[in-house]
Image: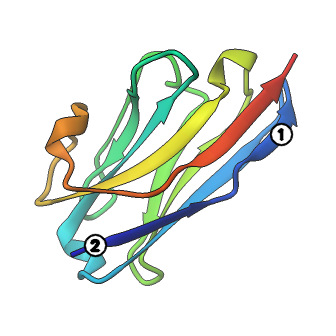
């Protein structure tokens, strides 16, 4: 069992930055791959970024590539999402997710555990 708790969301103006954190517990962090997803009102949940066990390999959606950076600190059992050059269309609830093994899944149904989400709102 893995517990995930996100933090760091908030209200920011377009062009600004936020850093989301997702702290995990209940399982050896170095054995689980992590991902970030988001869901805007009236839309389906979409993939944002994923990171492998070691943190060396990452994957991003086209809509955030070059603006967002996913990273992990295995000593702190935490994964981060640094979000720069934010746009109003980035407004959504952001979720972190975990799955066992070394992978970079983009499909939400490949993830076994989810956090409760943190709201990110970008004003124009």
Residue for badge 2: 2
Can you give x and y, in whole percent of width and height, for residue 83 in the image? Answer: 65, 39
Q: Is residue 106 left or right of residue 20?
A: left
Q: Residue at x 29, y 76 (%)?
A: 29
Q: Residue furthest front?
A: 42
State the residue at coordinates (47%, 16%).
43
Along the horizontal axis of the image, is 28 left or right of 70?
left
Q: Quadrant of residue 34?
A: bottom left
Q: Quadrant of residue 56?
A: bottom left
In the rendered structure, the answer to whether residue 20 lies left or right of residue 28 reads right
Label 1 secondary element? strand
Say how the picture is coloured.
rainbow
Residue 18 lies left or right of residue 83; in this view the side is: right
Find the distance from the CA under tag 1 to the CA under tag 2.
28 Å
Residue count near mark 1 (Cα–Cα under 10 Å), binned few <14, some 14–19, many ≥20: some
Disc 1: which residue: 11
Pinpoint residue 61: horizontal percent, then vertical percent: 40, 23
Q: Is residue 76 placed above or below 48 in the rendered structure?
A: below
Q: Position of residue 99 (x, y in %)?
A: 19, 57
Residue at 78 percent of width and 28 percent of height: 122
């Amino acid at each position: 069992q893995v517990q995930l708790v996100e933090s760091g969301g908030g209200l920011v103006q377009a062009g600004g930055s936020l850093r989301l954190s997702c702290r995990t517990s209940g399982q050896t962090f170095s054995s689980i791959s992590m991902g970030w997803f988001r869901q805007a009102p009236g839309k389906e949940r979409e993939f944002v970024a994923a990171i492998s066990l070691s943190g060396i390999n990452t994957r991003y959606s086209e809509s955030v590539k070059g603006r967002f950076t996913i990273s992990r600190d295995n000593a702190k059992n935490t994964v981060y999402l640094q979000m720069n050059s934010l746009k109003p269309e980035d407004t959504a609830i952001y979720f972190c997710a975990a799955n066992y093994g070394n992978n970079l899944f983009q499909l939400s149904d490949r993830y076994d555990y989810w956090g409760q989400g943190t709201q990110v709102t970008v004003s124009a």
